Amino acid sequence: MVIDEQQINAALQQLGFATFRPGQREIITNVLAGHNVLGVLPTGSGKTLCYQLPGRLLGGLTIVVESLLALMRDQVARLQAAGERRVVALNSTLDSRDFNEILRDLDRFRFLFIAPEMLQRPDVVQRLRNLAVSLFVVDEAHCISQWGPDFRPAYLRLGDVIARVQPAAVLALTATAPRQVQADILAQLRIPNARTYIGSVNRPNLFLGVEQVLRPQAKVARLIELLDAVHGPTLVYCGTKRQTEELAAQITKTTGYHAAFYHAGLDAHSRTLRERQFIQGDLDVLCATSAFGMGVDKPNVRLVVHMFVPESLEDYSQAIGRAGRDGRRSVTELLLTPADLATARQHVEAMPDRDTIASVYAHPQAFMRMDDAQVQLILSYQHLGFTAEQVWAQLQARKTESVAGFSAMIAFIDDQHCHRSVWLRHFDSPSVAHDDEWCCGSVTPAVIDAMGQAPVTASLSRPAPQGWRAVFSEIFNVESQAQE
């Protein structure tokens, strides 16, 4: 099938865009030509268009592997809003009747959104083998490296799926992949000769704030100062589920801002409701774990705050990428204490030992109901056909990578000259000159002034603080919890 420029431009307009952003045209034309492609584009740069447009022009089915149910819902809704009705998600929320009906009728659809775990079902893969698959997309492809070994090993079997389904082209997309992660993505998907487009990770409209304080109470006090200064939709990332709940309650009680919490422990309905409330502007502040954020497209987030230390610059970049997607200046702030560093390091180095792996493999039924993340990870590996030795090797390699990633995060925090330069260097992005007015460091009043902030909207106006300092010790007089 020969697709000309006129068809490409017509499809672009049908999807609601007048022009391409940097990198989009190069990726799309290569995919349409039948080439495998790895695209690394900064957050907010329109990665989804890179498969939505080809999917509308190519014959056959476009399979999109998504990491989260929220991402599936969002992408299905976007395509439907653009007039595409032949789109469906195949996931664990479906009852058996609906699941089987969709599976049977897949030849009627143009786009299929699916999780990597669902692609481990023999009936699903067999059905896909009987279809003409024009494009196999791995969205948020960094999850192959970051989640595959120690969280969701189904990502490590995507290469097997691609080999069996035989798509005409493979497209891997991400915003956060330094050189070694790029190589891992290509190796795992078995597309070593893929065309690559690597954009800069830099987001010039984001201020990269970093501040160390002595106690957790000081972090919360600083957070509230930032809320009052920035006056805009805010995402606050916390290290544990409990912290999201406590912090959201504290903000609501003592400031008058409308705050809520979000984490993986909420049921699907509650998560969806809070996503929509935040995106639609019904919430001023959302306190969340990393379960929230990837792929969430709220253009006007003005402030993103980390209340814990991310384990890698990749995790950090994904989170701050929620800010300023409309191109306006926005602030990000990493608040930490010395204890946060120790907690993060401990979590990074925590991996199952060889004896635990051997025990679970020898007696899987005895461990099946155990509520332990490491045990469940080992069982997942076993279910996917990995040997105990393969699991040990995977986890040891992942531990080495995790320690190196955390060291890069510490280097970013400790840098005394320009945090942005360290960040860009990690992702092999071109360096930029440090800008004293708007770059990185402490979020001072001058930085807030440099935002060029519009007048405060009515939805963010609030009454005067009601003595929040008096209740800090009651709320936060707890030991730092292990990351959940």
Image: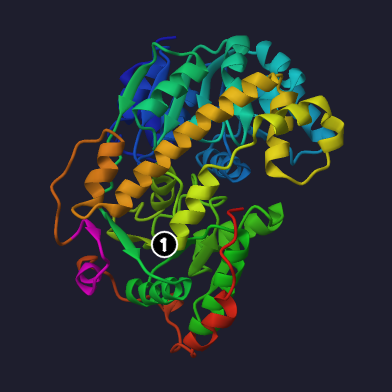
**Residue 364 in the image: x percent, y percent?**
82, 30
In which quarter of the view is residue 28 placed? top left
**Residue 440 belongs to magenta span:** yes
What residue appears at the point 48 percent right and 15 percent down from the top-left corner?
Answer: 169
Boundaries of the magenta span:
438-449
The quarter of the picture where the N terminus appears is: top left
In which quarter of the view is residue 403 placed? top left
**Residue 294 belongs to magenta span:** no
* Residue 143 in view (yes/no): no
- Report the front residue among 406 and 290: 406
Tell me: 466 left or right of 375.
left
**Residue position marked by numbered label 1 in the rendering:** 338
The crowd level at tag 1 (other Cα within 10 Å; few <14, some 14-19, many 20+) is few
Q: Is 443 placed above or below 3 here?
A: below
Tell me: 124 left or right of 209.
right
Image color mode: rainbow
**Secondary structure of the residue carrying numbered label 1:** helix
Which residue occupies the extreme right position in the image?
A: 365
What residue appears at the point 77 percent right and 46 percent down from the top-left corner?
Answer: 371
* Residue 406 in view (yes/no): yes
Tell me: 147 left or right of 187.
right
Q: Is 6 placed above or below 247 here?
A: above
**Residue 210 in the image: x percent, y percent?**
32, 60
Kind of residue at badge 1 = Pro
What residue appears at the point 56 percent right and 64 percent down from the top-left corner?
Answer: 480
**Residue 90 in the image: x percent, y percent?**
69, 32
**Residue 47 in the image: x percent, y percent?**
41, 35
What residue appears at the point 47 percent right and 86 percent down from the top-left corner?
Answer: 469
